[in-house]
Amino acid sequence: MKKRILVVDDSQAILDVIELILEAEGYEVATSQTGACFRQMERNPPDLILLDVLLSGEDGSEICQGLKSDERTRHIPVILISAHAGLRETAGGCGADGFLVKPFHLTDLRDIVLEHLA
């Protein structure tokens, strides 16, 4: 059974690239440009979430904190992605399981996904 990855970023170009890479690696990928996708997540939760910190009108670190404080979703690894300075501190402060700095190398994306789905 394929592992499901949810990618949330307000840039469609970034979503397209990540989706292409991860599907080529054999993952099932769902994408969203807003945090609204988390309201329907209970029906089919992902095995991993890649979450942009600076979403249009939403704060990815607050979304992460909410996911990590909810008993139903705290087990799902959340990897923050951003070009924002201080990403390491942001990830640590909201309970994220890891972070990926934009722009990132394709091998770094593959490695962090593998690490958290192993």
Image (cartoon, rainbow, N blue to C red):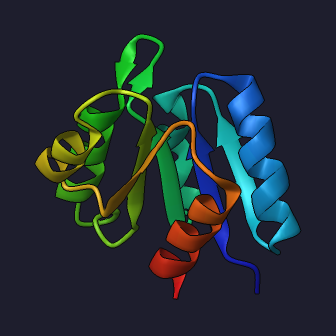
Q: Is residue 85 above or below residue 92?
A: above
Q: Is residue 117 above or below residue 105?
A: below
Image x and y of residue 56, in percent: 48, 13
**Residue under the point 48% across and 79% down:** 115
Q: Quadrant of residue 46?
A: bottom right
Image x and y of residue 118, in percent: 52, 88
Q: Residue furthest top?
A: 57
* Nearest to the observer: residue 110 or residue 15: 110
Q: Can residue 44 be seen in this snapshot?
A: no
Q: Can residue 38 be seen in this snapshot?
A: yes
**In this figure, what is the number of numbered marks?**
0
Q: On the rendered image, what quadrant is the N terminus found in?
A: bottom right
72 left or right, relative to 39:
left
**Residue under the point 60% across and 46% down:** 7
66 left or right, relative to 54:
left
**Residue under the point 17% across and 55% down:** 69
16 left or right, relative to 39:
right
Image x and y of residue 10, in percent: 59, 22
**Residue under the point 64% across and 68% down:** 110
